[in-house]
Image (cartoon, grey):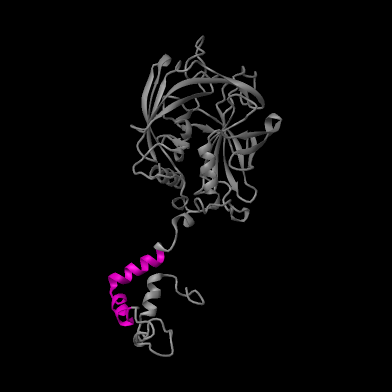
Amino acid sequence: MMHVGWITDSMDAIDFYNAGTADVTSQHVQFTANQSSLPPPNPSAPMRPPYSSVAIEVNSEVNQAKVADFMSNALTDPRVANETFPFDRPTLNSEITHPINSGLNGGWYNPETSGQGFMLEILPDTQRAFFAWFTYDSQDPVEGLPNSVGATDHRWLTGLGEIDMENKSITFDVNVTSNGLFDNPQDVTITAANSVGSLTITFDDCKTATVSYDLLNHAQINSFEISRISAESNYICEKMLTGKPVQELNLVENPSSGFTVNYGLAGGWYNPETSGQGILIDVLPQTNRVFFTWFTYDTQAPPEQASAIIGDPSHRWLTGLGEIDPQTNSVTIDLNLTTGGKFDDATPVQYSEANSYGTVTLSFEDCSNMQMQYNLYDTALTGLIDYSRISAENIALCEYLSNKQ
């Protein structure tokens, strides 16, 4: 406000124009005359209220607040402020300041295969991201090469990488992650950074990306496309491209109150009793389902003639798809044992029969705390594990979406 913008608040403007000559707060002269009171009534406009009556109203602190509220809020169409129809518009390229955001969390899939891809957790607070490559490879171990990619004692290729906003990419040092037990909160073992190689994910937009990898010790260099399957996650990512605070995004219509299972829960959940164990989930709101993967690693030697026992080193992941129960904010998932596929080959994976390994139920307390109850039938493993989240921005997104369902 004013010709040089030195007043920024409606109430300050009212105070300024309502001040008398004795007021020295602003050190600014409004007019050359009539500074101590409002001008006399205009005789040529008898139907208008006299200025003196206006002054009485404006001098009331209650009415001043009403005038300021009217000036600040009632004169702005909320559809304009929120850029909703009919005042919506495309996002200009110059406005895209945060191409990598929490809307990218969850599952990314290789469309050339059935079942291979990545789970991502973007950590905007630290400008980093966590990735896990979920191809499964259950080949027999190469004699004398227990650390070669594809050896059956491997679990995941994982990594933590720096976000490059300018190039819309994340480069990861790839680790082999092993140890840990499905039913034991022990720490996992992670190889030295970059000991396996490097991997870069470059995002075309909120729906598609390219993975380029160089697994140094294994002479595996390649690239392939990955894409998403959740329309709602794409929408939220696109809304977040402007870099506005989560609360200003107007992501979902028809607000309500209270916690609900929503896309903001997608990403990594960690067992605080361990270093490195947890789960990754991809929330799919449009189908009311959740995809689940359990990333504990277990590299014990396999018992003789017991290939189906959980902990057999030829296993890859326990995965599953489950329905969201909005009444209890929980998801019950029939577990599959997922094998097959190779880290460097577009080979479809194989799944055990649904529910053949047991069930897990994820019960969400809020956006940052969850309990997982599991029952693995064939191995008589049952228990309850607490999980939590580590990214404040991911938690904020979930909390906002919870109140906007």
Q: Is residue 355 above or below residue 208?
A: above
For the point 34% across and 78% down, the residue is 47
In magenta segment, residue 136: no
Q: Which residues are magenta?
A: 49-72
Q: Residue furthest bottom?
A: 33
The answer to whether one can see residue 121 in this image is yes
Residue 284 can be seen, yes or no = no
Q: Residue furthest top?
A: 305
- As drawn, 400 above or below 220: below
Q: Nearer the viewer, residue 86 or 113?
A: 86
Find out whether residue 53 is within the magenta segment. yes
Q: Residue at x 46, y 47 (%)?
A: 393
From this view, report whether residue 117 is shown above or below residue 169.
above
Q: Is 341 or 354 nearer to us in this picture?
A: 354
In x, y percent, where is residue 138? 59, 19
- Where residue 266 sits in the image (x, y, percent)? 47, 37
* Residue 254 against residue 284 in the figure, above or below: below
The percent position of residue 93, horizontal first and vertical second, equals: 62, 53
- Depth order, front residue of 103/374: 103
- Percent position (x, y) of residue 152? 58, 20
Which of the 4 image quadrants contains residue 77?
Answer: bottom left
